[in-house]
Image (cartoon, rainbow, N blue to C red):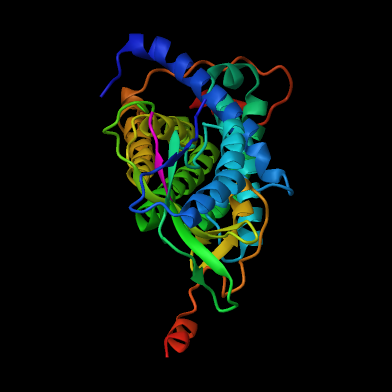
Amino acid sequence: MAATLAFATPPASETPDTTATKDIIQKVLLTPLSVREVKQSRFSRSRQPAQARRVRVIDEHPQKDSEGKGFMTFAIDARHGWAIDDVDLEWRKDVITGCTYAQTGEVFIKRGAGYYAADIMLGKKTRAAAEHVCVSDVSGAVASNK
Amino acid sequence: MRAPRQFLAFGRPLLWLVMALGSAAITATSLVYFNDDELPPFVIEKLPLPFEDLWLSALRLHVVAAAFALPACLALSTTTLLRRAPRVHRWLGRTSGAVVLFALAPTGFYLSLFAKGGVLATLGFMLSGLIVVVAMVQAVRTARAGNFVAHRRNALHVLAQLSVAVTSRAMLFGLDAANVDPDRAYLLSLWLPVVASAAVVHLYVPASRRNHEPMPEPRPPVGRDPGFRDAARV
């Protein structure tokens, strides 16, 4: 059985925001994903489930989108292969990227040019998120700096 | 070039059994594609897709066609069916030809445009599809012409390419276990079986009667069976 784990990587500077983000990702995405992957067929052209995953929170503090909502971007790395105890085994970086909204507990995944609710990874049909989602409001930041 | 007889004696039935089991496993695991409530991982990792509904319809038709074509071609490759029920062999062959040419190959070509692994993967699937189409057309033509040696060779080319579905999945599983880069693994597990399958048939299946083992003598027809005498004469 593939053991999918979320490793907390030693961040440059762990903040309450990054810890909260990791907790949300674990709860909303990684735990349900690992449950789903147990049932996934191994005799398939789709990617085999990762043996381990780790979350890297990119931002130290939340960014604001154009609606003023705070979000944190993250990346998930994965390890495949049966030699999971091999510490030298390479992590594949940025296998999943996206952002979380701590206030609502939402997780969005980047797919192509857009973002989708994390449900898409769990096999649920979802539409692309609104354009402002996970996009930092640069103009707002510039305006607020003036 | 000839494969050793001992290998053929044990290798053929074993290979046949592996392919039959692999085909059954693929069919069983493909049922998830028909669940409207949940998207399977293979679909999820491709999203977003242009014309998603069209792609999913093509995938479903491809899955159904493949679920029929591979077991059918396996059955057609047996001398038992040819000997005991030549009429069934012919009708199964005709049906398989229609399914492959009008469902499996066209949907496969369309799906290949969105294959993981980019242009090289698309080319790999297209090459496989092209071999299948050309070989199937030739298999039908040679059967109608009564050239059963060439028919067998072409039909085995079709079967060999259909078997890529099994061998490539097995390779993907093995390469993932070895932690090979997934993109490289995907291309390797596509191109290697496609080329190797074509090469094996090309090298080991006789193209003419001169280096061909005698075909099994068909049993005398029980009822009226037009075309049987032609088959027996070749």
A65 relative to A15 in the view: left or right: right
Question: Which residue does the image show at 56% across and 75% down from the upper left?
Answer: A132
Image location (x, y in percent) of residue B66: 59, 39
Quadrant assignment, res B229: top right
Quadrant assignment, res B181: top left
Image location (x, y in percent) of residue B20: 56, 24
State the count of labels.
Answer: 0
Give the residue furthest to the bottom.
A146
Residue stretch in magenta: A76-81
B215 relative to B51 in the view: left or right: left
Question: Which residue does the image show at 38% across and 18% down from the upper left?
Answer: B213
Closest to the observer: A9 or B215? A9
Image location (x, y in percent) of residue B34: 71, 44
Image location (x, y in percent) of residue B77: 52, 25
Question: Which residue does the image show at 34% across and 8% down from the upper left?
Answer: B6
Closest to the observer: A40 or A140? A140
Closest to the observer: B91 or B71? B71
Residue A136 seen anywhere in this rendered image of the structure: yes
B79 relative to A57 in the view: left or right: right
Question: Which residue does the image show at 31% across and 35% down from the upper left?
Answer: B199
B152 relative to B70 in the view: left or right: left
Q: What quarter of the picture does the N terminus of chain B occupy?
A: top left
Give the residue furthest to the front.
A16
Residue B42 seen anywhere in this rendered image of the structure: no
On screen, residue B19 above or below B144: above
Q: Report if residue A98 lies within the magenta region.
A: no
Magenta stretch secondary structure, dominant: strand
Q: Report if residue A80 lies within the magenta region.
A: yes
Closest to the observer: A36 or B119? A36
